[in-house]
Image: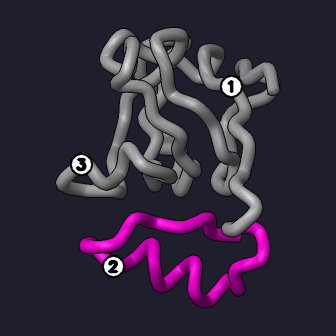
Amino acid sequence: MNLSPTNPPRPGQVVVLDRAASVQFDGDRGLTVQILEVDERPTLEGWAWLTVAVLGPPAARMRAAVRTVFVQPAGLRPAAIPEELLGMPRSRRVAAAKRADAVPQLIR
């Protein structure tokens, strides 16, 4: 995935947030997320606000598993989707993502 103005991020994509996306995700602060929403309002050139669901173990360390982040879409890269999430019914993934006390699952 090479995200750019001609190939912007879309809801449903699973990506890695690391230093290439924003310095706040440098080193062990990187996250694997699923994009829930892309804010269409104008912002700095080359940057975007995304609402994301945090996937995987890093979410256990966070107070909120759904976050809004300010990133450079060109720095996003695709993430592998865990096999156990692919077989989960959509209704269970959606319910899990809505529970504040649960790690959100892949929503499709």
In this rendering, position of residue 87 left or right of residue 20: right
Cβ–Cβ below 8 Å for labels 3 and 2? no
Q: What amino acid is at disc 2?
A: Arg
At x 73%, y 23%, the residue is 3
Name which of mark 1 and mark 2 comes first in the sequence. 1
Q: What amino acid is at disc 1?
A: Arg
Residue 95 painted magenta? yes
**Which stretch did the figure color magenta?**
86-108
57 or 9, nearer to the observer: 57
At x 33%, y 56%, the residue is 65
At x 45%, y 66%, the residue is 104
At x 37%, y 43%, the residue is 58
Q: Can you tell which mark lies on residue 62?
A: 3
In this rendering, position of residue 14 left or right of residue 26: right
Q: What amino acid is at disc 3?
A: Met
Residue 12: % across, % down:
68, 56
Identify the residue under disc 2.
99
Residue 59: % across, % down:
35, 51
Q: Quadrant of the N terminus?
A: top right
Q: What is the CA distance from the residue labelled 3 to the residue labelled 1?
A: 22 Å
Q: Can you tell which mark lies on residue 77?
A: 1
Q: Residues within 10 Å of mark 2 (few under 14, many from 20)?
A: few
Q: Quadrant of residue 63?
A: bottom left
Residue 51: % across, % down:
43, 49
71 or 100, nearer to the observer: 100
1 or 48, nearer to the observer: 1
Cβ–Cβ below 8 Å for labels 1 and 2? no
Name which of mark 3 and mark 2 comes first in the sequence. 3
Q: Residues within 10 Å of mark 1 (few under 14, many from 20)?
A: some
Does dot 3 land on a helix, a strand or a loop? loop
Q: What is the CA distance from the residue labelled 1 to the residue labelled 2?
A: 27 Å
Above or below — where is 37 with respect to 73? below
